Every structure is written in C-alpha cells, then in structure tokens.
Image (tube, rainbow, N blue to C red):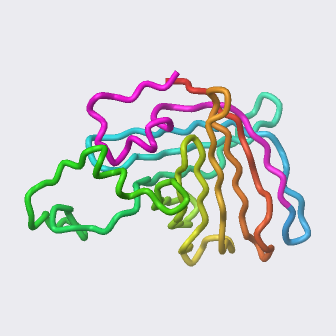
C-alpha cells in the first residue's frame, strides 16, 4: 500500500508512488558493434524529496557473475512535473527567487494535466560514465513514459545518442524497461528490471 507523506509538496503527488528505496534484479540484452552484451544485474534505486518541488533520484547497478558483483554505471538526477518557471522559483544557478514563495494546492497541480489525462515530466540524469540525459514524458497514474530530449557526453564517453524509459507499478513492484541507441546502433531494447520496495 502506498502512503503519501503529509509534508509532500502538491507538485509531487502524481509521483508519490515512486518514493522510497527499491531493490531487485534485471537483465541486460543488447547487441552492438558486433558484440553481444547480456547478463543479470542487481539494482538499487532511490527516490526521495527534501521539501522542494522535485524528487531526488539515485541508482546503482552491479553485474552478477556467480558470487561476484561488478559495478555498472551509477546515476543521479531530479524528476519534476513540467511547468513554466516563475519569479517564485530559484535559479538559474544560485540566483534567488524574485517573488514570494508560492505554495501550490492539489487544485493548482490539477491544472497541469495534459490532454492525455497525465502530467508532463522533466527528468535530468547524470551517469558516472560521462553521459548526461534530459528526458521528457508523462506520468499517468502508476505509469511513466520518458524519451530523451537531449543527450550530452564528455569527450571520453562511449557513443550514446538516445533512450526511452518506461516505469510502472505492478503488484507493488517497480518494473522498468530502458531502450538505448548506443555504440552505433539505433534505438533498441537494452535492459529491464523488477524491483521491490526495500525502505
């Protein structure tokens, strides 16, 4: 059962089912550049909030090889409902807000619903391998669909140009699938996992 914290900003209610730490396993199955990448991995994902109108995100994965666990890429980032910034919002950088703080109500958030009945999302992620992704998409009930709007790589990062992600809450488990376009291949299936709430 999902409990919505009483101190949760209204902006985060559509994402509240993600809150917590999730752990489980998944599979990798990707072919590119004449090579096949496959195997089972362990995954730990955390969604938290600190009172702002966004969720903090972190994820770590380890390739499972018998008793051995080899670290894979880690990610950190932020998830938020898409809405225009106002003078009440801080930024860019360390610039303070120019207007008084606005506390949005559930009714205010309802005005953000899109024509499909969901809420538009913006997700920014940074990978430990030098890849940065900006996703856009929507949350509609216990389902999230995301597609990259931009991918930026450091000079030493491997080729990676696009991705999609799908998240869903099914039987109290967080299921996700991640398709990527990497190493010269077009967008295709890459990994998926089933996670249970650990905290």
- Of residues 63 and 6, the one nearer the viewer is 6
Give me the residue at 80% from left, 73% from top.
185
Q: Residue at x 45, y 43 (%)?
A: 15
Q: Is residue 60 above or below residue 96?
A: above
Q: Is residue 144 above or below residue 185?
A: above
| Left or right placement of residue 44 versus residue 120 in this view | right
The quarter of the displayed image where residue 98 is located: bottom left
Specify whether residue 19 is painted magenta.
yes
Question: Where on the picture, by quarter, is residue 50?
Answer: top left
Residue reaching furthest to the top: 1
- Residue 171: x and y, percent? 67, 27
Vertical placement of residue 5 versus 89, above or below = above
Tell me which corner region of the image, top left, top right, bottom left or bottom right, holds residue 127. bottom right
The residue sitting at 48% across, 26% down in the picture is: 2
Q: How many marks?
A: 0
Q: Is residue 48 inside the magenta stretch?
A: no
Which residue does the image show at 89% across and 64% down from the upper left?
35
Q: Nearer the viewer, residue 52 or 130?
A: 52
Task: From the top left corner, tell me how far across and down residue 129 is, in percent.
Answer: 58, 61
Q: Nearer the viewer, residue 52 or 77?
A: 52
* Residue 57 place in picture, x, y as percent: 46, 46
Q: Is residue 6 left or right of residue 82?
A: left
Q: Is residue 154 left or right of residue 109?
A: right
Relative vertical location of residue 147 with respect to residue 29 in this rendering, above or below: below
The magenta stretch spans which residues? 1-30
- Residue 154 appears at what percent x and percent y? 54, 74
């Amino acid at each position: 059962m999902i409990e919505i914290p009483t101190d949760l900003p209204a902006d985060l209610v559509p994402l509240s089912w993600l809150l917590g730490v999730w752990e489980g396993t998944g599979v990798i199955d990707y072919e590119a550049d004449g090579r096949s990448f496959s195997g089972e991995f362990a995954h730990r994902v955390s969604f938290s909030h600190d009172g702002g109108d966004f969720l903090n995100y972190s994820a770590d994965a380890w390739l499972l090889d018998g008793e051995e666990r080899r670290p894979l890429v880690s990610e950190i980032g932020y998830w938020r409902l898409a809405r225009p910034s106002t003078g009440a919002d801080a930024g860019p950088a360390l610039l303070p807000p120019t207007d008084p703080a606005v506390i949005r109500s559930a009714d205010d958030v309802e005005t953000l619903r899109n024509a499909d009945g969901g809420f538009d999302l913006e997700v920014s992620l940074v990978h430990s391998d030098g890849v940065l992704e900006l996703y856009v998409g929507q949350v509609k009930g216990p389902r999230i669909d995301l597609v990259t709007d931009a991918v930026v790589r450091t000079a030493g990062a491997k080729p990676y140009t696009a991705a999609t992600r799908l998240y869903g809450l099914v039987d109290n488990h967080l299921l996700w699938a991640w398709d990527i376009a990497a190493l010269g291949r077009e967008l295709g299936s890459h990994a998926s996992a089933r996670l249970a709430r650990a905290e």
